[in-house]
Amino acid sequence: MIPTLRLLTTTDLPAYRALLLPGLVADADSFRIAPPDEENASFPTRGEPDSFTLGAYLGEQLAGVVSFQREGQDRVKLRHKGLLFRMYVAPECRGRGIAGLLIQGLIDRARNLGDIEQINLTVVHTNPAKRLYERFGFQSFSLEKRAIKWQGNYVDEETMVLFL
């Protein structure tokens, strides 16, 4: 089955949570948010051209998500930057090109905005997704030691950038 992309909205919040919440538990070391952070959170984006969430579907199943927002939404000097965040693909759907489809879809939409010059993201230093981001041209530019602390353990986090 070929995955397809769809723009998600606030009406997709139940399906979004059903996908993401188990991932926050199973892949806790890959996220900077914890299950309690997400349980009552609002939808992560505003459904505007510069604040959107994409969903990848296998048939009717939501298999993966990624979000984007302009970093300088209310700061004129930062409006040239965007942020890729909350990238996740369900374990049973991995290895089918879904993550790449989501990243490419996000990059294409960001480019079409016309005034986004770079996309930043953070990734746990040991996360295999880092290699995928590098294949799309993202480059690491900082490492924050002990950036995340969860259940007594620390995790380092890298910041990466893609110049469009």
Image (cartoon, rainbow, N blue to C red):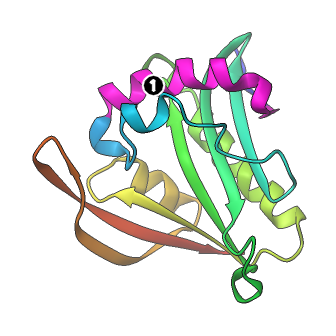
Q: Residue furthest front?
A: 40
Residues packed near mark 1 inside 10 Å, few (<14), some (14 to 19) or many (20 plus): some
Task: Return the residue at label 1.
Answer: 21
Q: Nearer the viewer, residue 69 or 88?
A: 69
Q: In the rendered image of this protein, does residue 29 appear above or below residue 20?
A: below
Q: Position of residue 96 (x, y in %)?
A: 56, 26
Q: Position of residue 109 (x, y in %)?
A: 82, 55
**Is 148 contained in the magenta span?**
no
Question: Majority secondary structure of the magenta segment?
Answer: helix
Q: Quadrant of the N terminus?
A: top right
Residue at image coords 66%, 42%: 102
Q: For the residue marked with disc 1, what is the amino acid?
A: Leu
Q: Nearer the viewer, residue 82 or 129?
A: 82
Q: Residue furthest left?
A: 152
Relative to 69, 63 lies left or right: left
Q: Which residues are magenta?
A: 6-27
Q: Residue furthest top?
A: 60
Q: Position of residue 16 (x, y in %)?
A: 62, 25
Q: In the rendered image of this protein, does residue 153 appear above or below residue 95?
A: below
Which secondary structure lies at badge 1? Answer: helix
